[in-house]
Amino acid sequence: MDAPSHLRSVILCVDDEETALEVRKQVLEMAGYGVLTATSPSQALEIFRNNHVDLVLTEHIEPAALGAGTLAAAMKMLKPEVPIAVYSSDWKESPGDMRFADIFITKLVTTDELLSTIQELLAKSPPGTAA
């Protein structure tokens, strides 16, 4: 899970469904992104704390899985400058997630739409601040 050696954006993908996570990782890597993955909130927070991350793409994670609050809330407390996209099969965002996430992306979007949204989020974040 090392960060890439050359300059490219690093995305932390979080999903408890390993097959979906692997497919998403392959798509993002083919698009030129460095990808770190996590299958649980605790693993995601550890990776987020200890690695350079430019953007988080996370499946909706139930607050109960974290004890209190959402994964997006915990991450924003650690690194408020890192954009967080909640990626879900739901049609509509969860109010709890969206209090802290920067955007909601439904899994019904095409791969091109997903990549375009990620690129837009990365373009909005200040360069070099997501250490």
Image (cartoon, rainbow, N blue to C red):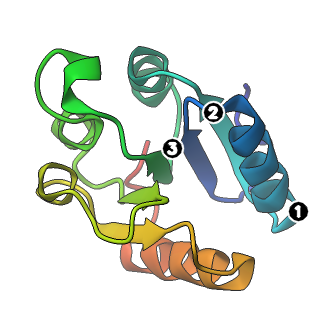
Horizontally, residue 126 falls left or right of residue 38, namely: left
Image quarter (top left, top right, bottom left or bottom right) of the N terminus: top right
Q: Residue at x 55, y 37 (%)?
A: 15
| Mark 1: secondary structure | helix
Query: Could you tell me how far apart the alpha carbons at marks 2 and 1 are, in whole angstroms?
Result: 20 Å
Query: Could you tell me how far apart the alpha carbons at marks 3 and 1 are, in whole angstroms?
Result: 18 Å
Callout 2 touching callout 1 (CB < 8 Å): no
Horizontally, residue 45 falls left or right of residue 112, namely: left
Where does label 3 land, which residue?
A: 53
Query: Is residue 126 in view?
Result: no
Where does label 2 land, which residue?
A: 17
Sequence order check, earlier mark of 3 and 2: 2
Front: mark 2 or 1: 2
Query: Could you tell me how far apart the alpha carbons at marks 3 and 2 are, in whole angstroms?
Result: 21 Å
Residue type, label 3:
Val
Task: Say which of 85 and 1 sits in front.
Answer: 85
Task: Say which of 71 and 128 sits in front.
Answer: 71
| Mark 2: secondary structure | loop
| Mark 3: secondary structure | loop
- Quarter of the image for residue 37 reads top right
Q: Position of residue 9 (x, y in %)?
A: 63, 58
Q: Residue at x 57, y 74 (%)?
A: 108
Where does label 1 land, which residue?
A: 30
Q: Residue at x 44, y 30 (%)?
A: 48
Sequence order check, earlier mark of 3 and 1: 1
Category of crowding for the residue at label 3, using alpha-carbon neighbours closer than 10 angstroms: few (below 14), some (14–19), many (at least 20): many
Residue type, label 1:
Met
Horizontally, residue 131 falls left or right of residue 3, namely: left
Query: Is residue 10 in view?
Result: yes
Q: Residue at x 35, y 36 (%)?
A: 61
